[in-house]
Image (cartoon, grey):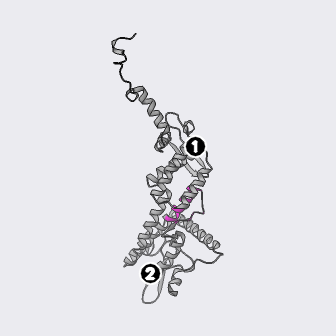
Amino acid sequence: MWDDRFTFVKMPEYNAFYDPHCINFISSIKRNNSTSHKRILSPIRNCKVQARLSPGKVRTKKATNGSSLKTLKVSKRDVIVLKQAVEDLWTKHNFPSNHQTSFRKLISRLNFYKAAVAIVNEIESIEKNTEPYQQLKKAAERRNDLLNKVQNIESKNEAISYLQELRTETCEVINRLKAWRTKLDDHTLTFEYNKENYVITIHNDYFRLIQSQLANWFSFEKSKVDALLLSPKVIEINSIYFKYHPIAITNTTQDNTLRVPLSKDLLHKFVSTQKYFENELKILQSNKGNKPISNPMIQDSHN
């Protein structure tokens, strides 16, 4: 029944944005129409989804409330939004084009659910600086910094410690390369550093290394590239003859100061990584018509 409060002149003005019920409705519409990838990230994170980007296999772990990835409504539009978000991150962090191409090929084989999880994991790992490519690049930078310190070595003990550290850093780079390829399910990926395939960089670094002052204390393998430095031997000079002591292969020695001892597990890891590197060199040579990779020291002598 109308009274004086609801005459045409005195009728209160209605504003939907001040109505608590309408505010919730309007907010839900805005969320559904939002193009922000964070709208999609949150529910997937809440479900504690774990993805493994290897041949399109995705593992999901249910949350405590029983929800899982399949209960989420992931649309084609959501995947497009996530794709744009990861593209922006690639640009921001200078990811190479071959990484981007391989990732696109990988998610193209997945359905909306798995593609969304894969992209979310990619976004999160990049934001946390734990993406395999980022770790590979950091490992290469550490190794290059170490190589630049070779001129500072002044004693045999320093040289032994240096080779041990360089061996570890080189092993780390090669294993990071394997992890990067495995995640993207593309074992043809090449990692370029300073515009050069890093496998070739390791190859060339070895020949420069054996021509450095380290040759004053070590006898190096010259018939092949000993990338993991498993064969160098310490040279002991006395008035009568030279003695050669291997620094890497075993723990048994008459003079422990002349070797860098390795455990069996560590030795197996280094040997396995060395074989992987040698296989990479063979692939590069086969791509060049079985022509050997040029020795940089020979090139320098011609210049």
Q: Amino acid at mark 2?
A: Ser
Residue range highlighted in magenta: 173-191
- Mark 2, residues whose alpha carbon is within 10 Å: few (<14), some, or many (≥20)? few
In the rendered structure, the answer to whether residue 15 lies left or right of residue 120 reads left
Is residue 300 or residue 149 the one in the foreground?
300
Q: Residue furthest bottom?
A: 240
Question: Is-magenta flag for residue 175?
Answer: yes
**Residue at 43% across / 27% down in the picture?**
22
Q: Residue furthest right?
A: 289
Separation of disc 2 and disc 1 at Cα? 58 Å
- The x, y position of residue 295, in whole percent, is 54, 80
The disc at residue 76 is 1
In the rendered structure, the answer to whether residue 43 lies left or right of residue 291 reads left
> What secondary structure characterizes most of the magenta part?
helix
**Residue at 45% across / 58% down in the picture?**
93
Question: Is-magenta flag for residue 244?
Answer: no
Is residue 88 or residue 5 the one in the foreground?
5
